[in-house]
Structure formats: structure tokens, C-alpha cells
Amino acid sequence: MLYVVRTLGKLAFDGVADKRTSFSEAELEQWVGGKTKTDEELRQLAMFRTDVLDFFLAPCVEHGKRLSEEPGGNEEKRYVFAVHGMQEYLAALYVVLGENKSVLEKLTKQVSVVIGQASEDVSALVNILSKFIPLRVFAVFNLLKLFPNLYEKFSRRNRSTIARTLVAEMFRSEDSYNEDVLDQMEQSLLGVHGPKPKQYSEGPPFELYPIFMGGLLHYGNRVLLQQLGCEIQSLTVSQITGVLRKYLVRELSKPQPPEELMDLLVLLYEFQNPRLTAEVLASIRSIRLTNIRMTALKCFILSSVLSCAPSSYLLEELNLSSCLLTQDLLQMLGPAFRHTRSLKLCDNPLQESGLLTLLEALPENQTLMHLSLMHTGLGDQGALELAQKLQHHPLQELNVAYNNIGDNAALALVDACREHPTIHTVHLYLNPLSVVGKQSLYVRGVAMSPSDRQVKVLASVTEGSDISENWHPILSVIRENASSWDRSRVTQQLKAFLRDLEWGRQQQPSFWKRLHFRRVEMGVRKTLQILEKDCPPPSA
């Protein structure tokens, strides 16, 4: 195995550093046996080339050509790693084993260069990573442990059988995280004889490389490597850990796109080092994973990372909107909800069952002030469940807009909020509320005596006969989400807003107030025009 790391590992590392996924025969000759001297090394090299090399590398071809066709006069045969992620794994193994001291000396620069979003060729494997990420790609080396004499045994066995065993080990059918694999993989797992990749990627470099590097530093993996004759020195562990810690603290303290943030959380999880994780989390004040498909694996990673935080740790915001969260995934995310002031779960199909799961997890969070459940399919029953169980949560603001909540359930929810010691605002717009229902909600929210609590109810762009001071934020929310919401329902609600504005304007004796109503009407009509313009014409 050490021979594999010293040869193919070097090749893989150079490819990662130069953002390349294919290699020429000359490069293979340089790194695989270029410095061989003794007869034993020659024998080992011959076996390696005939029985092992083809397992890791496969020829790649141009689009439209057959594998049997010979390259043209100006073309050279090129090779790719049969499993795309194996290139990054071997590169990480090459570094952590300290095979190139200059790499360790320059590690700060190297890590900052190679960490980033993967190219298209590699991104298909990003979501395979599971509870023991390196061990899955590491399965090929676990297979090698079965054979006392590596090279002789390989020559006697069918390599395709070994490859199938590798795939079975990496993606076992009973694994609850296989959803990531099935969701991401659209080609052969081994990728043999695939299209020729670009020689130099135009996008950011590989991202699995640092993730594997972090995972290989885990004590259990270091023990396994040592059993295979590859020892990671303590000094190497210290050097790499220190560099990656600084990198994570620096990157996670800056706003990150959701995809990049998820990758960094995976890298942090791979360390399996609670103290390091707690140190890095201290620099994070918000986690926004909007539009990330949160599979069981990603939910497990997020919960595991946040479980390492001390009890005093607090996130200002955890945003998991439009993440396709379900009841089962919410159960996994329970530990992640303990450390946040603002929790946004908008545009997820939670429904009543998911709400009950969420309410069971929230009592452990005594710092949650803002909860947004907009467009989560709660319905009347979900609103009534909220009304019954709100007293156990220290909320200040609750958003249940666009949830198909009717008059009676909305009134019960507002009554519960009035009895709550801290809730001051409830969002109920875009629900099918009648004109009488909206007026009743506004009246219920107003304090009738000095001893009563006042709750601001946002059910429309108006509050009674006056303009709501939140009319502009309400319209902004509608504009931002109109493309993904049911346009006919949103259009219906906007027309109801216009009727509310017309009625309120008629109640105003002041010319200036009527002018203000006209201004808000223009904003609503403009939003309607945007919806109608973007709406496709009806089919004949």
C-alpha cells in the first residue's frame, strides 16, 4: 500500500495541485517506476503494472470515439482515475503520510489553494460522504488486508470482482445514507473509459481532497493505516490540523454561499475532534443553508457539528429554508436547534406531523426568539397544535404565513399568543382569511386594558382601517418567492389586499392618508403585474 501511495499518490497530488484529472503515459512512466533500481523493485513494479495499476487508472477517450480506436498522430493516450474520488483520496493520503516534506512545509499555501468547490467531474461524489467518510473510499485498502501477499494475490483474482466488492463496501444497501448516492450518481460508479475530461479545469479546484485529509487524521483511521504499514507521524498530524483549523476559522467567519458552507461543515465534521470543532464554531454566528437538499447524511453532519458546541454557544440564525426537510429529517436535526435565536424552516413540506416533531425538539432551546414556518403546509390543525403548545417556548415572533390557515384556527392562535408572556408579532398573511376574520384578528391583537398584552397581527397590508407599517416587507417576501409558490393562490391573495386597501381608503377622511393608501395600492398592483408577466400563457 505504501508503494501505491508513493507512486499514484504523488501523481494524484500533482493533479489536484494543478487542477487536472487526466494524465499522459509519460507522466505515468515518471511517477510509476521512474526511479526503480533493484531487481526486487523491478519485480514489484512489473506486478504493480499488470495487476494493480489498471484497478486505479483507466484510459479515457474523446467524445464520439471508441475505446478500440488508436489515438491520432498528434494525440496521446491519457488516463483518469477509475473512481474519481480516489484521486483526491490518494492525494490526501500522500500528504498525511509525509511522503513529501516540501508539501508539509508549504501546506498553508497548498491547503488554501486546493480547498474549494469541485469541478463537475468530481462534484457527483461530494454527497457520498457518510459517518466514516474516508473508510468508504478506504474500502479498497481494507480489501487488500485480506491478502497476506498483496501482489501475488491480486494476480490470481479477477479485478472486476474486486471492483464490484469495492462498490458493495462503499454503498451497502442497508446504509441509511444511500439516498445521497442515489441522488447524485448519474453515471457508472467506476467511471471506466468515460469521456475525456478537460485538461485544466476552469472552475475552483477539488474539494474532496481536504475533506479526506481531515478524515485521515482521525485516530481510528490512523490506526488502520498503521496496520497496513503506513504510519502518520504525530508532527504531521499537528501541522495539518493547525493549518486546517486556521483555514476553517477564517472561512467560516465570512459569509459563504450555502454550497460552500455545507462543504466546510463536512470538512469540520471529518476531523472527529470535538475540541477543534468547538473552537471553530466560536467564529460562526449564522448558518444559512437555503436551497441545499438536506439528506439524512447532511442532517447528521450538521447535528454532529453543532453538538460539539458548549452550552453557552449561540447562533444568531439557522436558516434551513427550501431544504426539502421532512418529519424524519427534523428528528435528526434536534441537536442543531438548541443553539439558535432565529430558526427559519420556510418552504419545507413539514405539515402537521413535522410540526409535532419540531415542537418536541424545541423545549431544549431556551434562547429561540424567532420561528419562521412560512409555507410549510401546517393547515388549521397545525395552527391549533401551535396554539396549544406555544406556552413552553420563549418565542417573540412567529411566522405562519401562507399555510392555508382559516379564520377559526387563526383566531385561536392569536388568542394563544396574547396569553404568551413574550410573543409580540404573528405573521398570518397569504392565508385564506375572510374580511371579517382579518378584522377580528386585528381587534384580538389590540390591548383592551393596561393589563392586557398587545400582539401585532400581520394578516394583510392593512391593520383595521389603517396601513400596516409592515406592508413593504410583506410585498417583498411575495416578490422573492412568487416564482416557486402557487401563482394563482398568490394572485388571489394580492387581489384581496387590493380590496382591503380600497375599503380602508374609503374610511379615511384625510386626503394625505388616502394618498398613502394609493401609494400602497400601486405597490400591490406592481407585484401583480410581475406575477402576470412571468406567468406562462394557458395551453390551448
Image (cartoon, rainbow, N blue to C red):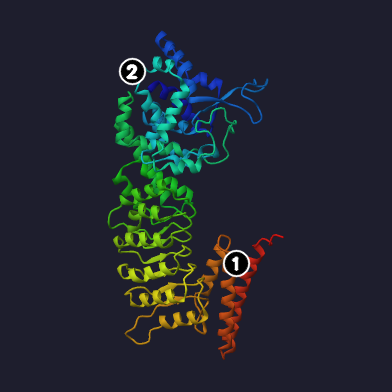
Which numbered circle lies on residue 423?
none
Disc 2/disc 1 C-alpha distance (Å): 69 Å
Front-lying residue, 423 or 259: 423
In the picture of the structure, the residue carrying the numbered disc 1 is 488
The spot of residue 168 in percent (x, y) is 42, 32
Q: Quadrant of residue 528?
A: bottom right
State which quarter of the image contains the N terminus.
top left
The spot of residue 44 in percent (x, y) is 42, 14
The spot of residue 152 in percent (x, y) is 40, 14
In the picture of the structure, the residue carrying the numbered disc 2 is 148
Circles 2 and 1 in contact, beta carbons < 8 Å: no
Assign a secondary structure to mark 2: loop
The spot of residue 96 in percent (x, y) is 37, 31
Neighbour tally class for label 2: few under 14, some 14-19, many 20 plus, Cα within 10 Å: few
Q: Amino acid at mark 2?
A: Pro
Q: Residue at x 30, y 64 (%)?
A: 366
Q: Residue at x 57, y 63 (%)?
A: 486
Front-lying residue, 440 or 38: 440
Q: Is residue 113 above or below residue 437?
A: above
